[in-house]
Image (tube, grey):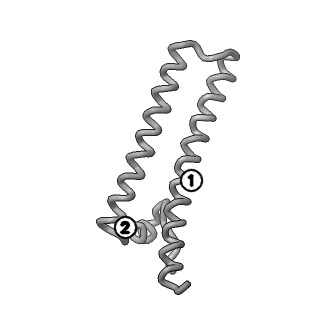
Amino acid sequence: MDAASFAIMMDSFDQLLQVFCALGIFGLLIFFILSIVKIRTGQRLNKQDAAAMQEMVMRLQQMDSRMATLEKILDAEVPEWRGNLDNAGGVYARQAG
């Protein structure tokens, strides 16, 4: 395996890791919201709260999908955008090299 193919493989792994991290963050957010609601009420969610929670989950999934789509577009159109975030102190900055 040469250096170029290894770099491509690591870049793909980087992107996959970022997607899993984003999904994990949204999953934890939903878990914490459900935990707090259950602790505060001391009972199960009523139908109205369950519907609101389901809508929130749906919106979070849509937002995650949109973020992934935007990242794919940026990767195709402006491959160095992640490096630009690194220079600006961005959250998704990846290591050079």
Please state the total of marks drawn on the protein image: 2
Q: Nearer the viewer, mark 1 or mark 2?
A: 1
Query: Relative to residue 20, is residue 95 depicted above or below?
Result: below
Query: Relative to residue 85, is residue 68 depicted above or below?
Result: above
Work out whether residue 25 or residue 36 is closer to the camera in this orientation and state it.
25
CB atoms at circles 1 and 2 under 8 Å apart? no
For this orientation, the residue located farthest to the left is 77
Residue drawn at the location 54% of the way across and 19% of the way down: 50
Residue 76 falls in image quadrant: bottom left
User: Disc 2 residue type?
Assistant: Trp
**Tag 2, which secondary structure?**
helix
Q: Position of residue 4 (x, y in %)?
A: 47, 83
Quarter of the figure that contains the N terminus: bottom right
Q: Position of residue 30 (x, y in %)?
A: 57, 35
Which residue bears the numbered disc 1? 21
Residue drawn at the location 46% of the way across and 39% of the way down: 61
Local crowd size for mark 1, using a 10 Å CA cut-off: few (<14), some (14–19), many (≥20): few
Work out whether residue 83 or residue 9 is closer to the camera in this orientation and state it.
9
Residue drawn at the location 68% of the way across and 15% of the way down: 43
User: Disc 1 residue type?
Assistant: Cys
For this orientation, the residue located farthest to the front is 1
| Spatial separation of the CA atoms under disc 1 and disc 2 | 19 Å
Work out whether residue 39 or residue 73 is closer to the camera in this orientation and state it.
73
Is 13 positioned to the left or the right of 36 in the image? left
Q: Any mark on residue 81, and which?
A: 2
Q: Position of residue 96 (x, y in %)?
A: 50, 77
Q: Position of residue 95 (x, y in %)?
A: 52, 73
**Tag 1, which secondary structure?**
helix
Which badge, 1 or 2, comes first in the chain's sequence? 1
